[in-house]
Image (cartoon, rainbow, N blue to C red):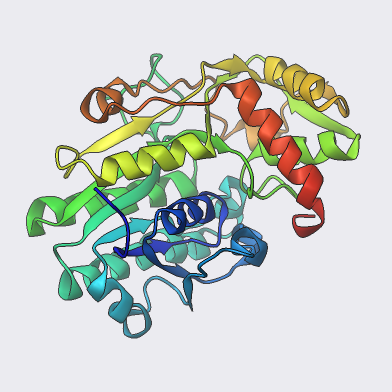
């Protein structure tokens, strides 16, 4: 398929993963509209789409604002829904705000889409977070759901809404459960989006960061590989009405990751600390995704090793840190 001239909507397109997806789609010739509330605290950054040629249309609005977003949704052939709040601690401190951003907004969005364009191909960005502490590894899609925090509950509800609309209304929806995605354009000023972001900040500033615990094993997906997965899902009819895990690089312990980051950066250092009590309560421990189902149905494979992804990420922030700090 050619993306040339195809109308596409990306919600959350000013954020980390969304902006990388937008840039790829625009480069392929798609006619992209971004819907984003531009909440800087959750990763929206105008620089993420700066100097993009051709420029994309931006609708600065909540995805649940039907009157504002309906015209763009009504003509979209593909909709990538990546809008949402990702901070686990923020969700525990402001649960009703997380409810509004991650659950209510998505239900309003789906209702708008059902009324205006039920035939659109929709890919929803979900999360592995709501599996909770794994009962077995690697975690496949049949693993029990046990959200460890408010954010996980709301994210699972949002995914369930998408799958309900696919099952009951016949909408062409796929959900991808993401693991730890990293790369250029992620938030690095703090840990609201991912702990690896603030580690990278310290690495490029040649300062020290903290590793809590350290034995936990995690897998990581470089953002360009994640973009590949979104596009592969969108172009596969077989994935409609299904949910899939997306993994990536082979798992490493957090200590191994810290050592690798410092070695590749040639700067920065880390201190090992006990897990803060409030964080320990919602930490999931080890996590490794079993994404064999998605690989089998789409042929997707990650193209970047963890080393390559970290090197490209560090190079990006060394060139553009001022826009992210």
- Residue name at image x 44 percent, y 42 percent: 227
From this view, report whether residue 73 is shown above or below residue 242.
below
Q: Quadrant of residue 305?
A: top right
Observer-nearest of 310 and 246: 310
Q: Is residue 147 visible?
A: no
- Describe residue 196's horizontal placement relative to residue 16 as left or right: right
Q: Position of residue 18 (x, y in %)?
A: 49, 54
- Residue name at image x 30 percent, y 39 percent: 232
Q: Is residue 155 visible?
A: yes
- Residue name at image x 75 percent, y 45 percent: 317
Q: Position of residue 38 (x, y in %)?
A: 57, 70
- Describe residue 165's horizontal placement relative to residue 150 as left or right: left
- Describe residue 67's horizontal placement relative to residue 88 as left or right: left
Q: Farthest bottom residue?
A: 67
Observer-nearest of 295 and 94: 295
> Is the C terminus in the top left, top right, bottom left or bottom right quadrant?
bottom right
Q: Position of residue 136 (x, y in %)?
A: 38, 14
Q: How many marks?
A: 0
- Describe residue 324's horizontal placement relative to residue 53 as left or right: right
- Residue name at image x 51 percent, y 21 percent: 249
Q: Position of residue 27 (x, y in %)?
A: 46, 55
Q: Farthest right residue?
A: 206
Observer-nearest of 44 and 160: 44
């Amino acid at each position: 398929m050619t993306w040339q001239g195809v109308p596409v909507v990306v919600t959350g397109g000013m954020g980390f993963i969304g902006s990388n997806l937008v840039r790829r789609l625009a480069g392929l010739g798609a006619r992209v509209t971004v819907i984003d509330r531009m909440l800087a605290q959750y990763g929206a950054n105008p620089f993420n789409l700066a100097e993009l040629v051709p420029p994309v249309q931006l609708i600065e609005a909540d995805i649940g604002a039907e009157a504002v977003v309906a015209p763009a949704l009504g003509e979209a052939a593909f909709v990538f829904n990546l809008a949402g709040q990702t901070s686990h601690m923020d969700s525990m401190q402001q649960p009703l705000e997380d409810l509004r951003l991650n659950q209510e907004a998505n239900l309003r969005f789906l209702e708008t889409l059902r009324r205006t364009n039920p035939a659109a191909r929709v890919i929803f960005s979900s999360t592995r977070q709501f599996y909770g502490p794994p009962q077995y590894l690697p975690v496949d899609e049949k693993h029990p759901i046990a959200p460890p925090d408010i954010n996980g509950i709301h994210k699972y509800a949002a995914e369930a809404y998408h799958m309900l609309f696919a099952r009951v209304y016949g909408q062409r929806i796929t959900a991808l459960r993401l693991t730890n995605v990293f790369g250029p354009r992620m938030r690095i000023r703090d840990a609201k989006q991912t702990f690896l972001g603030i580690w990278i900040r310290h690495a490029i500033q040649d300062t020290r960061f903290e590793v809590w615990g350290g034995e936990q094993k995690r897998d990581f997906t470089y953002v360009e590989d994640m973009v590949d997965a979104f596009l592969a899902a969108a172009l596969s009819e077989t994935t409609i009405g299904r949910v899939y895990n997306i993994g990536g690089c082979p798992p490493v312990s957090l200590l191994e990751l810290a050592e690798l980051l410092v070695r590749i950066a040639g700067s920065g250092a880390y201190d090992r600390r006990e897990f803060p009590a409030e964080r320990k309560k919602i930490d999931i421990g080890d996590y490794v995704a079993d994404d064999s189902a998605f690989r089998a149905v789409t042929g997707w494979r990650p193209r970047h090793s963890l080393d390559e992804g970290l090197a490209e990420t560090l190079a990006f922030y060394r060139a553009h840190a001022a826009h992210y700090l």
